[in-house]
Amino acid sequence: MLEQAVLNLSSDDTTLSRKQVAMRERESELLDIACGIVAREGFAQLNMDKVAAASPYSKGTIYNHFNSKEDLFAALAIQALGKKIPLFKRALDFEGTSREKLIAMHTGMHLFSKLSPILAMCALVSRTPAVTEKSAPERLEKLNALEELVVSFGDKFIELGQRSGDLTLAPGITSDSIVFANWAMAFGTSSLVNNATQSSCVSRQLSTNIVLQNLNFLLDGMHWAPLSCDFDYQKTWERAEKDLYGKEIALLESQS
């Protein structure tokens, strides 16, 4: 079921009409323009007038794609999830223990947050009441479906840990709580590293792999074997970068 969902997500445009393909391409172009505005001015300054002014399209055309700026935020979140999910699939196929596969997933998430910091933040922005109340229902339905798919990937990593005997859940701890803890740790750490470098708390850690460090704190606390004192997970991180995310690393290097 998970594999079929990923296959559906990555299907090509061969079943779409020429008009539908053009609509999809135009929407992607408008989302890129919106990202540029947010990068320069911040989320609070994004509005439909600015998107229209920065694009070759009329405001009416833009409203054919998005019914409000809030709907635009939801569309950005959908785009973000669509780009993250293939990274998770690669991590599941990574050669290694269940914990190494999970670390490979976090490697991909961190690279995504560095490559697309605006899209990475949309996971939070798109879930505020101001956005969900004004987004198109069909947009929210797609966003919810993609979020469920992401959560199912998280469940899969936990299942692999339990099946292999690397992870035994303590009484009162559920798969849901571990999936949330992983997401909160990854999102929070990457957000701080990418956006709060002037903070002394962050700057003191920039010479270390702070994402992996925090992840090891979390997984060691769950007694997810092998523990970090018994295994070099920095080598796992580097192997994931090389074997799974070479394209993303090359893009980052081209931007520096």
Image (cartoon, grey):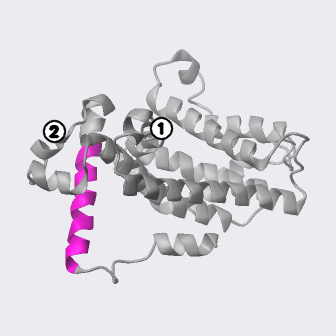
Q: What's under tag 2, amino acid-wise?
A: Lys
Residue marked by disc 2: 50
Check the picture and name the quadrant holding the N terminus.
bottom right
Check the picture and name the quadrant holding the C terminus.
top left
Q: Is residue 8 above or below residue 141?
A: below
Q: Is residue 20 magenta?
A: yes
Drawn side of residue 73 relative to residue 11, left or right = left
Image location of residue 66, percent across then percent down: 25, 51
Q: Residue at x 54, y 16 (%)?
A: 200
Q: Is residue 225 above or below residue 42?
A: below
Nearer-the-camera pick, 110 or 42: 42
Residue marked by disc 1: 124
The Cα atoms of the two marked residues, 2 and 1, are separated by: 22 Å
Q: Dominant secondary structure of the magenta stretch?
A: helix
Q: Residue at x 38, y 38 (%)?
A: 131
Q: Is residue 239 visible?
A: no
